[in-house]
Image (spheres, rainbow, N blue to C red):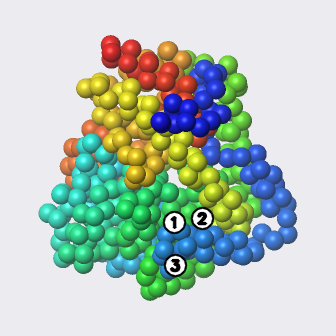
């Protein structure tokens, strides 16, 4: 019997206010109390908690080395700068945030866009080998939305051509394939603990690797950075607190949802921009000075405290995914993520492809449903990266069609069913 059939109790199954917000931070009230104590405490530069976090991740992944980062994109930068020579090429997916491409460029490498599998959004391994040249040094694979990329095939290609395999597991913390964790199957893995992630430390990241020479260079680079200031960390905490309060069920459903729905109806961008993400799509050729910092002990303690919740949170998202899949699988116009029960997809987002996502999103909002469009662009098409342009039609279509259905750990299963009913109604099912 499945979770949604009440095999065991789930408080999130109770009747919910309508609608819940499309997104909520994976936070607890204690996170803010811990933050206040730390921000006003005396031991801001104590690195003991970081060493504990690193040791814990090494134990989880089976890798020998882990290095805490202020944010995941910094991890991508220092990993590439430490493992790849300037001027070398990195084959990567265009289905990612712009700053991933920027970090490759800042590290002195050349991004080579490879198209994606149109059914999964992940890198298509069968399109990689024609792109390999004598200058190719690595493959950077993104496990999109929590779905592990085809790592068996990717590892075969990397080993055949003696390439580094770097995993961007920012959206896939906790995902497993054949017992191996995402981020621990290649030569370098990068995790994110940012505001939108299932393990949230306001922001932050970590790099893990089995290679001592890579780990040594990464740690040497990061230890030159100053620790993130209390002022900056306090600003991050406050920003998350405001978003947390704004998405409380009662406040959101009675006030904010109506404001946002009106703004979308009238295309009032001065309002809708407050819930859009990845607004900075510019090219960065030099590593930003404000990225040059170290993780704080506060962030490290928050990550460690949340690790025990990863599996429970995943089980709830899996229950949501089952409901979405069973309710939508017979609608031919939609592209659904694969239904995986083995942990190789942790459904940090439930992303579907729709032929006219703008119309579907507006219809759902009119019916009292709050959903989001995918925030990521096809980076191969961005003007900022014209110099590296390569035609990736699958990634282009993915960026135009993908819509995000809510499934976070605080999202009620009753709300999932309502979303399914409205989508069925839209398509006349």
Instruction: Classify residue 140 by image quadrant.
Output: bottom left
In 3D space, how far apart are the residues under numbered discs 3 and 2 (Cα atoms)?
Answer: 17 Å
Q: Nearer the viewer, mark 3 or mark 2?
A: 3
Q: Is 11 or 132 nearer to us in this picture?
A: 11
Given residues 319 and 397, the one toward you in this image is 319
Q: Which residue is mark 3?
A: 65
For the point 56% across and 52% down, the residue is 311
The label shown at residue 70 is 2
From the top left corner, tell me how far across and down residue 12 is, in percent: 62, 33
Residue 237 relative to residue 339: left or right:
right
Q: Alpha carbon of mark 1 to alpha carbon of mark 2: how far? A: 7 Å
Observer able to see residue 66: yes
Secondary structure beneath dot 1 equals helix
Tag 1 residue: 74
Please name which of the two marks, 3 or 1, marks the residue nearer to the observer. Answer: 3
Disc 3 and disc 1: Cα gap in Å?
17 Å
Mark 1 and mark 2 in contact? Answer it, CB < 8 Å: yes
């Amino acid at each position: 019997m499945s979770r949604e059939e009440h095999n065991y109790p789930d408080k999130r199954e109770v009747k919910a206010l309508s609608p819940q917000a499309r997104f909520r931070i994976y936070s607890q009230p204690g996170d803010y109390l811990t933050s206040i104590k730390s921000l006003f405490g005396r031991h801001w530069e104590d690195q003991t908690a970081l060493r504990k976090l690193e040791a814990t991740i090494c134990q989880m992944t089976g890798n020998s080395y882990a290095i805490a980062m202020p944010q995941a994109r910094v991890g991508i930068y220092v990993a590439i700068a430490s493992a790849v020579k300037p001027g070398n090429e990195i084959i990567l997916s265009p289905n990612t945030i712009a700053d991933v491409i920027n970090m490759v460029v800042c590290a002195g490498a050349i991004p080579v866009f490879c198209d994606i599998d149109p059914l999964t959004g992940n890198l298509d391994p069968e399109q990689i080998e024609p792109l390999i040249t004598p200058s190719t040094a690595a493959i950077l694979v993104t496990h999109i939305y929590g779905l592990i990329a085809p790592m068996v095939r990717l590892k075969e290609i990397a080993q055949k051509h003696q390439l580094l395999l770097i995993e961007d597991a920012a959206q896939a913390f906790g995902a497993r394939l054949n017992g191996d964790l995402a981020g621990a199957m290649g030569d370098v893995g990068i995790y994110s603990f940012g505001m939108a992630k299932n393990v949230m430390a306001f922001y932050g990241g970590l790099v893990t690797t089995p290679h001592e020479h890579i780990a040594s260079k990464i740690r040497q680079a990061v230890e030159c950075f100053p620790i993130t200031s209390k002022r900056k960390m306090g600003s991050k905490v406050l920003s998350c607190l405001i978003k947390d309060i704004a998405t409380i069920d009662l406040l959101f459903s009675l006030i904010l949802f109506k404001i946002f729905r009106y703004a979308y109806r009238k295309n009032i961008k001065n309002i809708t921009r407050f819930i859009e993400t990845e607004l900075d799509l510019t090219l960065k050729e030099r590593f930003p000075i404000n990225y040059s910092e170290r993780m704080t002990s506060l962030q490290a303690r928050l990550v460690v405290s949340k690790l025990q919740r990863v599996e429970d949170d995943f089980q709830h998202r899996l229950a949501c995914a089952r409901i979405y899949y069973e309710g939508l699988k017979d609608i031919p116009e939609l592209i659904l993520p694969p239904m995986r029960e083995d942990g190789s997809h942790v459904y940090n987002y439930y992303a579907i492809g729709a032929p006219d996502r703008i119309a579907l999103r507006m219809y759902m909002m009119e019916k009292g449903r709050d959903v989001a469009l995918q925030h990521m662009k096809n980076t191969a098409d961005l003007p900022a990266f014209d110099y590296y342009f390569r035609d990736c039609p699958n990634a282009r279509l993915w960026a135009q069609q993908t819509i995000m259905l809510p499934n976070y750990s605080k999202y009620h299963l009753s709300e999932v069913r309502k979303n399914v009913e409205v989508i069925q109604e839209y398509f006349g099912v």
